[in-house]
Image (cartoon, rainbow, N blue to C red):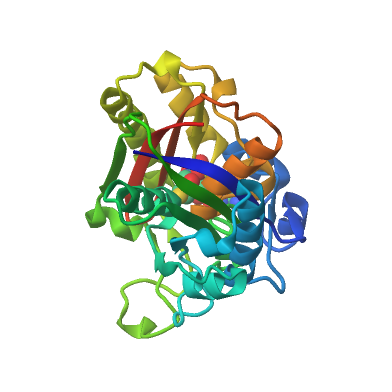
């Protein structure tokens, strides 16, 4: 059994906020932001919500896969920033796209969320429970940002990405790896709007930037070696490494550590900023639409973020 991505879609809000616009709001500069992160701009939702963006991305992925919504067995939405708790975003998406036969639920594993959701769907396929899943990462992080905190507001953006995953009868072995370290959770944290007084965390995203940076550049190369070992592949055999789009310096450092050319690490964070669980499916959709993903290509996809969580998988396109 192999859980193959057979369609992708994405949605980004119209308002592209560049570093110059941000530097009118907080004491920062385009030069500082680009040199520390690689980010030039990010999309910021005005009317869009986690659900509306998820629906737009989902419809595109379904069109791209050439399937009928009624053929979808499972809808998972990964998000940390939904405007509502009940009903869950996945049920709203299920209704809006007419996936009448699908089960639906949300999942929160922050920036590792798309990876976790993909692995849950693939595991259900392996167990023989489902054949087709729609996995979506949708984030409206502008809901959670303190727009006076220059340490965080420069990093994040809004958007959604979706993938249709279809069960293929194949003997390709696909190793999945997920990790967490909850003891370090305070390094990237935010309380919800409800019962916030009982939470040790503040009302907006707090981040210990240096701790998160160190965590990512240490754990992701190790994670990739773990995936390579389990898939029986060498690092040279991998055509592309699709990593969570948090920071260009983090990705460059990982490429150096693996001694692989940076051209094997496509990026779109320059225009999107960090869109948490949406970053990987949006990147997949960008590459798919540009025709850069060829049949048989070997990919390693990996994410990391709050929790702390990190995980990844080996995929063949
Ligand atoms: N513009 C200008 N100056 C800024 C700034 C901004 N937006 N943000 C912070 N600074 C200042 C700080 O106040 C500090 O000034 P000081 O030395 O006078 O105190 C100085 O720049 C250095 O701050 P520091 O936080 O140490 O910077 P850094 O080099 O660690 O870069 C990050 C900050 C956030 C870019 C970096 O830590 C990072 O990328 N971390 C990973 C974040 C991430 O990817 N998170 C999501 C993971 S899912």
Label count reads 0
Q: Is residue 262 above or below residue 97?
A: above
Find residue 106 and report its horizontal and vertical position in percent.
42, 67
Find residue 109 and report its horizontal and vertical position in percent.
37, 58
Q: Residue at x 53, y 33 (%)?
A: 249
- Residue 113, by quadrant, is bottom left
Find residue 139 and report its horizontal and vertical position in percent.
55, 62
Residue, far left? 183
- Residue 230, by quadrant, is top left
Instruction: Name the foreground residue: 289 vs 173.
Output: 173
60 relative position to 259: left or right? right
Instruction: Name the foreground residue: 51 vs 214.
Output: 51
126 relative position to 295: left or right? left
Find residue 227 and report its horizontal and vertical position in percent.
32, 30
Instruction: Please identify the quadrant where the N terminus is shown.
Output: top left
301 relative position to 181: left or right? right
Q: Is residue 292 visible?
A: yes
Instruction: Name the foreground residue: 271 vs 71.
Output: 71
Q: Is residue 253 above or below residue 208?
A: above
Q: Is residue 132 above or below residue 266?
A: below
Q: Residue at x 58, y 46 (%)?
A: 7
Q: Is residue 159 visible?
A: no
Instruction: Name the foreground residue: 138 vs 1.
Output: 1
């Amino acid at each position: 059994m192999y859980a193959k991505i057979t369609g992708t879609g994405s949605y980004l809000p119209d308002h592209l906020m560049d570093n110059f616009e941000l530097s009118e709001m907080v004491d920062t500069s385009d030069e500082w932001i680009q040199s520390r992160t690689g980010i030039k701009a990010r999309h910021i939702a005005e009317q869009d919500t986690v659900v509306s963006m998820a629906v737009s991305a989902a419809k595109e992925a379904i069109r791209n896969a050439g399937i009928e919504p009624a053929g979808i067995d499972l809808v998972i939405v990964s998000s940390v920033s939904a405007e509502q708790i009940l009903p869950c975003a996945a049920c709203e998406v299920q209704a809006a796209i007419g996936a009448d036969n699908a089960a639906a639920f949300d999942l929160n594993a922050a920036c590792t969320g798309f990876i976790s959701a993909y692995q849950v769907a693939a595991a259900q396929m392996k167990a023989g429970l489902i054949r087709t899943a729609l996995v979506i990462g949708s984030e409206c992080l502008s809901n959670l940002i303190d727009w006076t905190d220059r340490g965080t507001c420069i990093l994040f953006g809004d958007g959604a990405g979706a993938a249709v995953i279809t069960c293929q009868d194949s003997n390709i072995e696909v190793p999945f790896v997920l990790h967490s370290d909850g003891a370090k959770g305070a390094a990237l944290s935010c309380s919800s709007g409800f019962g916030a007084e009982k939470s040790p965390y503040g009302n907006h995203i707090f981040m210990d930037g240096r701790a998160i940076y160190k965590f990512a550049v240490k754990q992701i190369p190790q994670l990739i070696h773990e995936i390579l070992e389990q898939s029986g592949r060498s690092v040279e055999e991998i055509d592309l490494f699709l990593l969570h789009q948090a920071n260009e310096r983090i990705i460059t450092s990982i490429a150096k550590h693996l001694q692989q050319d940076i051209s094997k690490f496509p990026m779109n964070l320059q225009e999107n900023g960090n869109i948490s669980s949406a970053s990987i499916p949006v990147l997949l959709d960008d590459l798919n639409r540009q025709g850069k993903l060829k049949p048989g290509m070997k990919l390693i996809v990996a994410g990391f973020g709050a929790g702390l969580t990190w995980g990844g998988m080996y995929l063949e396109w």
